[in-house]
Image (cartoon, rainbow, N blue to C red):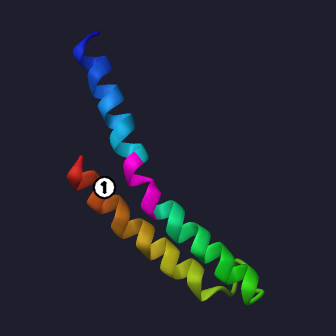
Amino acid sequence: MGANTQTYFAFVAFLQTWLIFPTIIGILTFLYNVTFEFTAEDSPADFLYAFFIMIWSIIFYTKW
């Protein structure tokens, strides 16, 4: 295998590990919206989730 293939698989493994955090927060946001009957337009949790994803993506990029 070449260096490009090894880099690809290293990145995919790194990405899969890091996607656990947004998944957990996304599920909690969904459950919050369903429990309190919020829509996408009026949910305060959606703003917090978007903010979390912004911070997460910056940290993800710097760690890779």
Q: Residues within 10 Å of mark 1 (few under 14, many from 20)?
A: some
Image: 56 above or below 2: below
Q: Is 26 left or right of 35, judged from the image as shown?
A: left
In magenta stretch: residue 35: no
Q: Nearer the viewer, residue 13 or 56?
A: 13
Q: Residue at x 38, y 49 (%)?
A: 17
Image: 49 above or below 7: below
Which element type, helix, strand or loop, lies under badge 1? helix
Residue 55 location, quadrant: bottom left
Magenta region, residue range? 17-21
Residue 10 location, quadrant: top left
Image: 48 above or below 64: below
Q: Residue 38: tell me if it is visible.
A: no
Q: Residue at x 33, y 36 (%)?
A: 11
Q: What residue does disc 1 label? A: 60
Q: Position of residue 44 (x, y in %)?
A: 59, 88
Q: How many marks?
A: 1
Looking at this view, name the residue that lies furthest to the top.
Answer: 1
Badge 1 amino acid: Phe
Q: Residue at x 29, y 9 (%)?
A: 1
Q: Residue 14: tell me if it is visible.
A: yes
